[in-house]
Image: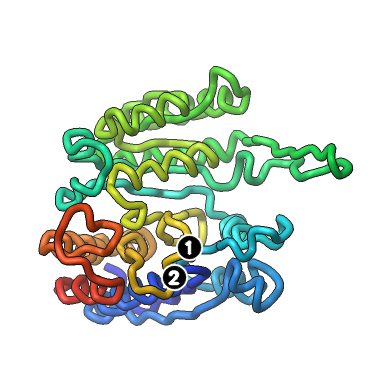
């Protein structure tokens, strides 16, 4: 078991980011102190907050603090006030930049239906009951980073260009990650592509099949991305690990918010060869910022993933998820989960209820 000192770089970001980060840190500090883990936290700006204060979405000090930490915890970035900025001054560039600088090549997004929240999903109970899947998304390639890219041409006749580009080694390493994680679960990987149309997907499928030879105990299936989107809402319990390229994973993982009833309940971990980054998958929700109504579950669950993957303390991760389950089972809800009934409380109150159940 891992004890001792741990340094965490915290990036609150924009909108509800600071609020949900405060909730997550309250839980993190509670668990760490009881486990004898000394945690040092440094707060740094990113996204819109960093643009306003430093003229860039990813200041050098923020980057260096992340690189020197054991893990990074992020709130959310973005908001309408920066929508008219040029591409290099958009808040999202800070997130893409930190992923690239840290070498975070894989994003892990668990989607697990909690029995107490079955009423929250817009799908029928019998469809979502028992959902427990993990989206493993490649992060460094594809349309978001491929070159050439940009907007060119004279006003009135502009051309927008993005390139979907994948190298063999990028596909190999994320495929290995997916198969390794599947071995810890139900040993089934579904690889998502568009191999009937895209050459880059044909390479993706070929390389994934080659990597699969190292994991004969894991079942491998292939699905086209459009069919996968349909299957996720028709029969989501068929999936264990979903392996996707960058953009497909970005889109498909948000369907998890429909399956669980609220995107506010979903955490994620971005992993590579250095410090991992943990964040909820929802956005900055500027319309509810400062109102004490944001759902902190996704961020607190991200802290649980941090204990499991960065600190090698799956036992502490389970304490956190169990406390969340108990809080929900006792009827406490944030506003976005009101459809399942129960007592509606604010962000701070919900966090305190979780803390009371941690022991």
Q: Position of residue 123 (x, y in %)?
A: 26, 37
Q: Which quadrant is the N terminus positioned in?
A: bottom left
Front residue of 16/225: it is 16
Horizontally, is 359 left or right of 73 in the view?
left
Examine the rendered structure and indicate whether residue 3 appears above or below residue 253.
Answer: below
358 in relation to 121, above or below: below
Q: Position of residue 128 (x, y in %)?
A: 23, 38
Residue 204 image offset from top left, x and y in percent: 54, 29
Image spot of residue 145 (x, y percent): 66, 46
Badge 1: residue crowd in 10 Å (few <14, some 14–19, many ≥20): many
Residue drawn at 76 percent across, 40 percent down: 148
Q: How many marks?
A: 2
Report whether 253 appears left or right of 336.
Answer: right
Q: Which is nearer the N-term, disc 1 or disc 2?
A: 1
Residue placed under numbered mark 1 in the picture: 284
Q: Quadrant of residue 95?
A: bottom right
Q: CA distance from mark 1 to mark 2?
A: 8 Å
State if disc 2 and disc 1 touch (CB < 8 Å).
yes
**In the picture provided, is 218 more to the left or to the right than 284?**
left
Q: Quadrant of the C terminus?
A: bottom left
Viewer-side label of 1, 2: 2
**Is residue 71 in sight in this rendering?**
no
Question: Which element type, helix, strand or loop, lies under badge 2?
Answer: loop
Location of mark 2 (residue)? 289
Q: Residue at x 28, y 47 (%)?
A: 260
Query: Can residue 253 be seen here?
Result: yes
């Amino acid at each position: 078991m891992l004890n001792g000192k741990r340094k965490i770089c915290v990036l609150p970001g924009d909108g509800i980011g600071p609020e949900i980060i405060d909730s997550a840190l309250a839980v993190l500090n509670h668990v760490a102190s009881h486990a004898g883990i000394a945690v040092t936290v440094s707060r740094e700006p990113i996204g819109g907050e960093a643009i306003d204060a430093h003229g860039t979405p990813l200041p050098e000090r923020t980057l260096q603090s992340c690189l020197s930490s054991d893990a990074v915890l992020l709130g959310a970035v973005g908001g309408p006030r920066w929508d008219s900025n040029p591409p290099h001054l958009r808040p999202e560039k800070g997130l893409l930049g930190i992923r690239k600088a840290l070498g975070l090549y894989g994003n892990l997004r668990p989607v697990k239906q909690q029995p107490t929240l079955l009423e929250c999903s817009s799908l029928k109970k019998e469809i979502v009951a028992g959902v427990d899947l993990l989206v493993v998304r490649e992060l460094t390639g594809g349309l978001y980073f491929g070159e050439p890219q940009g907007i060119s041409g004279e006003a009135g006749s502009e051309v927008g260009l993005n390139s979907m580009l994948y190298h063999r080694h990028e596909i190999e390493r994320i495929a290995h990650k997916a198969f390794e994680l599947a071995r810890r679960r139900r040993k089934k990987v579904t690889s998502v592509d568009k191999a009937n149309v895209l050459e880059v997907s044909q390479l993706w499928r070929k390389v994934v099949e080659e990597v699969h030879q190292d994991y004969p105990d894991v079942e491998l299936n292939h699905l086209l991305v459009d069919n996968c989107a349909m299957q996720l809402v028709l029969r989501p319990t068929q999936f264990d690990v979903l392996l996707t390229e960058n953009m497909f994973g970005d889109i498909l993982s948000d369907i998890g918010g429909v399956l669980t009833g609220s995107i506010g309940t979903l955490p994620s971990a971005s992993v590579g060869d250095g410090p991992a980054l943990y964040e909820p998958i929802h956005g900055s929700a500027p319309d509810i910022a400062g109102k004490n109504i944001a759902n902190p579950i996704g961020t607190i669950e991200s802290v649980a993933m941090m204990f499991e993957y960065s600190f090698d303390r799956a036992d502490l991760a389970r304490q956190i998820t169990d406390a969340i389950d108990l809080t929900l089972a006792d009827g406490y809800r944030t506003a976005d989960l009101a459809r399942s009934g129960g007592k509606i409380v604010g962000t701070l109150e919900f966090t305190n209820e979780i803390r009371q159940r941690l022991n």
